[in-house]
Image: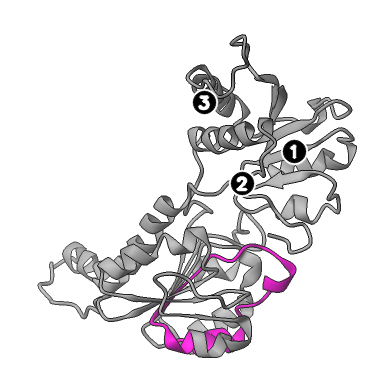
Amino acid sequence: MIKLTILSDEAHEIAEALQQKIADSDALRGTNRESLLTIDQVTCHPDQVDTDNVTVLLSDPDLTAVIINKCSALKWCQSTWAGNAPLLNAGRTDYMLTGLKGIFGKLMREYVFAYLLQHARNLNAFEKNQRAATPKWEASPRAPLNGQTLGVVGLGNIGQALIPVANAFGMKVVGLTRSGNDVKGAERVYTPSEIEAFSGACDHIVNLMPDTPTTQNLLSYEFFNALKPHSIFINAGRGSAVDDEALISALDKGTFAHAVLDVFRHEPLPPTHRFWHHPNITITAHSAAESQPSDVASVFLENAERYLARLPLKYQFDFAKGY
């Protein structure tokens, strides 16, 4: 039997999605048809959680981090986020922590290729020509994606979802990962010690690295200075991976063409930050691949079935590795 506490800014929406899915699931019913999963508490306020008795949490990591050390009976926490830095940095490791994975690839594909295609087809120039006081008929310069190489920093599940789309546009894909192990569909996978060679081999790069001690400032001067003048850099991983000064310096020198930034060291990004006003930076508000309550419910219920069957949970974090 699972008695579930939901702690999230979208707690009530997640609870509603769960209840709909539970009603349709035979796997979560016992031999007498009784439900093996009950929702005990639904809240968006950490101070309302019964920390002495909660055993299973479905929760936002930032809210959970406030109370994690008080939850003495906690056995399993299913996060509502893909990244879990607030909990991985909290110091407690005597429970199972599972992440939200397997649902972001389809959204990330849209985000990444929306901006790559905008650049490749020079849509901004055509828009400017159309809106000019005297409309301008001009075949503005374009740089088709066909034949180019897309680099993915952090070639995990989300990054691998980009490969078939890149291939469909005639692009090759190379990756950079901690292990450097081969990945199906990638021409080559580099390690962080080869970061300059990796950067120089790419036409455009997407960062999808999680926030771990080893990724802090990984993308620094060496990385940015090896990019090509036509390169687009997209950061949809974590802001801590980017050395902000190195990025701005490289853009100011014309080392690469443009940066699309969705994540930052401090969010919301302060209105005085230089990123807002740089002509070659596009800002989006941590919206590249947002989870939906129904997606959160689906991932949780799959793991709930495994939990009840005493099977290993999917997407479990290794506290020692930080991912």
The N terminus appears in which quarter of the rendering? top right
Could you say which is closer to the camera, residue 208 or residue 142?
208
The C terminus appears in which quarter of the rendering? bottom right
Could you say which is closer to the camera, residue 107 or residue 267?
107
Of the numbered discs 3 and 1, the one sitting upstream in the chain is 3
Q: Is residue 215 magenta?
A: yes
Label 1 environment density (alpha carbons within 10 Å; few <14, some 14–19, many ≥20) = many
Q: What residue do we see at 20% from left, 62% from top? A: 131
Residue 128: image location, x then y, percent: 24, 67
Q: Label 2, label 1: how many angstroms apart (C-alpha)? A: 12 Å
Q: Secondary structure at mark 3?
A: helix
**In the image as oriented, which residue stretches furthest toward the top?**
32
Instruction: Say which mark, if any, is on residue 17.
Output: 3
Q: Secondary structure at mark 1?
A: strand
Q: Which residue is mark 1?
A: 76
Q: Which residue is mark 2?
A: 314
Residue 242: image location, x then y, percent: 61, 73
Looking at the rendering, the stretch of residues picked out in magenta corresponds to: 199-227
Q: What residue do we see at 72% from left, 27% from top? A: 5
Q: Is residue 18 magenta?
A: no
Name the kind of residue labelled 1 in the image. Trp
Name the kind of residue labelled 3 in the image. Ala
Instruction: Say which mark, if any, is on residue 201.
Output: none
Residue 206: image location, x then y, percent: 47, 70
